Image: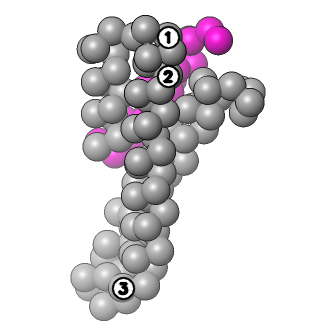
Amino acid sequence: MNLKTCLGQLRILAILEGISYLLLGLTMPLKYVYEMGLPNKIVGMIHGVLFILFCLWVIRYSIFKKWSLTTTLICLASSLIPFATFIVDHKILKHEVE
């Protein structure tokens, strides 16, 4: 995975966004059960930034590679479902050639 390419950056963003989504799920009980809001605030901000970057890179790469609308929407929707960015990376992004 080459970080100098758009595909490499997109794959890293997919993994990081998926991890941040899972961490956000772990910090939610801290916020609502134990009234510790700071971890959720920090992870939430990181997740928000990674979410936006992932969506922008999906659009950027889909224009560059002339992806179909279906593939683009699947990749964008994956950022809304836990574990889905890992699946998209494995099923779609891993097989892309740049």
Name the mark nearer the viewer: 3 or 2: 2
Q: In the rendered view, would you say 28 is above or below 49?
A: below
The quarter holding residue 31 reads bottom left
User: Which residue is pictured at 25% across the width and 82% down the height?
Assistant: 32
Query: Element at badge 2?
Result: helix
User: Which residue is pictured at 36% across the width and 27% down the height?
Assistant: 75
Name the mark nearer the viewer: 3 or 1: 1
Q: CA distance from mark 1 to mark 2?
A: 6 Å
**Residue placed most toward the observer, 4 or 82:** 4
Circle 1/circle 2 CB separation < 8 Å: yes
Residue under label 3, please give it: 37
Which numbered disc covers residue 61? 2
Task: Indicate which disc, 3 or 1, sits on the residue closer to the N terminus.
Answer: 3
Q: In the rendered view, would you say 81 is above or below 10?
A: below
Q: CA distance from mark 3 to mark 2?
A: 36 Å
User: Which residue is pictured at 51% across the width and 15% down the height?
Assistant: 64
Magenta stretch: give its range. 81-98
Within-10-Å neighbours for mark 2: few <14, some 14–19, many 20+: some
Residue under label 1, please give it: 65
Disc 2 residue type? Tyr
